[in-house]
Amino acid sequence: TKVTADVIKAMDTMKVIARGGVGLDNIDQQFIKDNNLNIKVVNTPAASSNSVAELVIGHMFGLARLIPWGNEQIKKGEWPKKKMKGIELGGKTLGIIGIGRIGQEVAKRAAALGMTCLAWDLFINESPIGDTVTMQSKDELLAKSDFITLHIPFIPSEGATLKADEFSKMKDGVFIVNASRGGTIDEKALLDALNSGKVSRAALDVFEKEPLQDDNVRNHPNIYMSPHIGASTVEGQFRVGMEVAQKLIDE
């Protein structure tokens, strides 16, 4: 849902725009600022953290054990037992790009599975959760990680965070998960990395254009997908609703 300049102009008595989610990139805040409008913009940054973190871990299991692919094969009448030798998450290194609320929840769960957690963040230099995460430079994280997950906003002026140059610095056979924002990964560069074997498999919950339009992404055998459902749990949506209501009351 986009709250564009046209929407804002049409709402003469608007006082608050409340986003039931983490980011504010779907609200034209610049228009509000440029026109000195007395409209407050709020969101619910904490309400869906657990839901998104659990989806990320779920996708990591899917990548490691080829669960979505195996499901498809069995439904086709196949029995691909010998083709489904996966890997364990325990003992692997997880690189977390963006160690805010959701990144921290992912790290806690990954550490409980026996993973080593590294993190890089543009704005955070020290680990916010102690020894659970070791802060690294971006290049160090790319070079050391067996799995990489993104938890950052998409900033159009800066473009994708993972482009061809970043993929070239990763381990061969790395696994990628993105449940943050479409555009944070250059999808063309990801496809090239998958086709070369640099990336083993990727799980995407977000896309450059939604609903997904690129058939090259849609039909790639080593991309597992979900339709932007990071916050779509009963519990998460209840917390989002309660937090939005409380913020409206507070305002």
Image: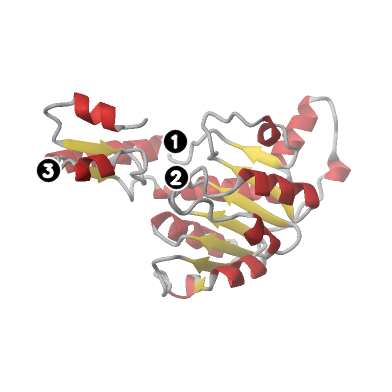
Q: Which residue is mark 2?
A: 51
Q: Residue at x 75, y 38 (%)?
A: 221
- Comes first in the chain, label 2 or label 1: 2
Relative image position of residue 184 (x, y in whole percent): 52, 49
Q: Nearer the viewer, mark 1 or mark 3?
A: 3
Residue bearing mark 3:
251
Circle 1 crowding by C-alpha within 10 Å: few under 14, some 14–19, many from 20: some
Task: Give the vertical position of 131 relative to 241 (above or below).
Answer: below
Percent across and percent down for residue 78 are 85, 30
Q: What's the amino acid at mark 3? A: Glu
**Disc 3 and disc 2: Cα gap in Å?**
27 Å
Disc 3 secondary structure class: loop
Q: Check disc 2: other Cα within 10 Å, few if <14, some if 14-19, many if 20+.
A: many
What residue is at 14 percent from the left and 40 percent from the top?
37
Horizontal side of residue 28 vs 96, given as left or right: left
Is residue 237 positioned above or below 89 on the image? above
Residue at position x 71%, y 48% from top? 201
SS state under label 1 = loop
Q: Between disc 3 and disc 2, whose residue precedes?
A: 2
* Secondary element type, mark 2: helix
Residue that badge 1 annotates: 232
| CA separation in Å, label 1 and label 3 | 26 Å
